DNA sequence: CCCTGAACCTGACCGC
DNA sequence: TGCGGTCAGGTTCAGG
């Protein structure tokens, strides 16, 4: 479900409900996620939530002492609900707040994660070696160009590598490459500096536009209050196999690159 | 260091 | 109706 815009939409949705509240209880019905939820996460109970942050596709609940680190995987979602709402299928965790509400974590495929970390969040092994945030000045064409020298990997895989830049998933990678006119299968190391300027700009534009529209709802994504995202209507190539390219009318193609479906126009993208 | 493919898990859908 | 195969928004890990 979630790429960066969906995670950011979720963060913005839950923030006003969590900020400055205390955690009253943690109800863990299914601890077997991507990694088991650690027992010592119970240290969170009784603590006040000072901030809700995002790093890459991770959500960070910053408590007085310690951080709950969450990832939504492919199918995870978070909802704010009344405390007495009975849990349904795949509702694995409830974080009860001190005002008779709860934050509910649902994840059918259980690729998501909920972890506990007491040191500075940026020192966590999962966060330590991540690339820059795409919507900051640290990410630009020069960064992509420099990191790509000598790499024979397809540029789409390169762009989705979290050590290069975070937050660009399968949908937005296809979309950004289309906007930049770059073929997804082109070797990353064989793309000129100028074209990387364009690609970095396309990534920034596509992600910020998607955030503005509340993310992309393909099947089941909803924000924390249950609203779908409206960016799906803006998708130019993703999921449009066989339909005409919006620029040139050529047929949109689909092929597997690095285990993932990729969508592109063979005429506009070189 | 770079790259590839397997693995984790459930559910929807399609053809027979 | 059932069964097998394919696909799905992510990311780590092992191995070459």
Image: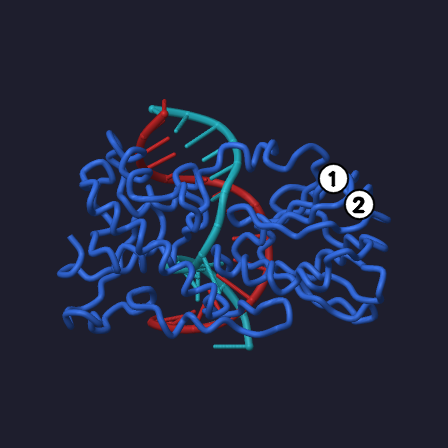
Chain colours: A blue, B red, C cyan
Near mark 2 (Cα within 10 A), the count class, few <14, some 14-19 or many ≥20, is many
Camera-side residue of A94 and A176? A176
Comparing A83 with C15, the one in front is A83
In the rendered image of this protein, does residue A251 appear above or below residue A117?
below
Does residue A243 sit above or below A138 in this rendering? below
Task: Pinpoint residue A195: horizontal percent, then vertical percent.
Answer: 21, 47
- Which residue is denoted by mark 1 in the rendering? A66
Which picture quadrant has residue B4? Answer: top left
Residue A250 tag number: none
CA–CA distance in space, label 1 to label 2: 7 Å
- The answer to whether the residues at label 1 and label 2 have Cβ atoms under 8 Å apart is yes
Q: Residue shown at 60%/45% (left/top)?
A: A34
Give whichever of A7, A2 is nearer the camera: A7
The circle drawn on residue A44 is 2
SS label for mark 1: strand
Q: Which residue: 20% across, 62% down? A: A265
The mark nearer the N terminus, 1 or 2, is 2
- In this rendering, is residue A105 above or below A229? above
Q: Can marks 1 and 2 be said to lie on one chain?
A: yes
> Image point 26% across, 43% down: which residue?
A154
Q: Is residue A250 left or right of residue A115?
A: left
Query: In the displayed structure, would residue A38 be above or below residue A84?
Result: above
Q: Chain of mark 2?
A: A
The number of callouts visible is: 2
Q: Position of residue A161 (x, y in %)?
A: 39, 41
Tell me the SS state at disc 2. Answer: helix
Q: Residues within 10 Å of mark 1 (few under 14, many from 20)?
A: many
The chain letter under disc 1 is A
Q: Quadrant of residue A25?
A: bottom right
Which residue appears at 82% of the width and 41% of the height?
A43
Q: Give x and y (percent) for residue A108.
A: 60, 60
Residue A125 x %, y %: 58, 32
């Amino acid at each position: 479900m979630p790429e960066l815009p969906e995670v950011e939409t979720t963060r913005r949705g839950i923030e006003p409900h969590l900020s400055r509240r205390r955690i009253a209880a943690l109800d863990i019905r299914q601890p077997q996620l991507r990694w088991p939820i650690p027992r010592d996460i119970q240290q969170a109970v009784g603590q006040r939530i000072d901030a809700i942050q995002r790093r890459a596709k991770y959500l960070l609940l910053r408590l007085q002492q310690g951080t709950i680190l969450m990832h939504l995987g492919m199918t995870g979602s978070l909802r704010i609900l009344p405390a007495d709402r009975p849990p349904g299928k795949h509702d694995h965790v409830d974080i009860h707040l001190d005002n008779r509400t709860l934050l509910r974590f649902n994840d059918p495929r259980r690729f998501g994660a909920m972890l506990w970390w007491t040191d500075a969040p940026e020192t966590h092994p999962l966060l330590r070696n991540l690339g820059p945030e795409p919507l900051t000045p640290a990410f630009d064409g020069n960064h992509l160009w420099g990191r790509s020298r000598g790499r024979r990997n397809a540029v789409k895989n390169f762009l989705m590598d979290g050590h290069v830049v975070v937050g660009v998933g399968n949908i937005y990678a296809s979309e950004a490459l289309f906007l930049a006119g770059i073929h997804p299968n082109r070797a990353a190391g064989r793309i000129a500096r100028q074209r990387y300027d364009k690609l970095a700009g396309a990534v920034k534009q596509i992600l910020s536009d998607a955030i503005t529209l509340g993310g992309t709802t393909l099947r089941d994504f909803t924000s924390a209050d249950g609203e779908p995202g409206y960016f799906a209507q803006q998708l130019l190539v993703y999921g449009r196999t066989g339909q005409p390219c919006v620029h040139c009318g050529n047929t949109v193609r689909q092929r597997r690159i690095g285990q993932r479906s990729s969508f592109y126009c063979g005429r506009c993208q070189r």
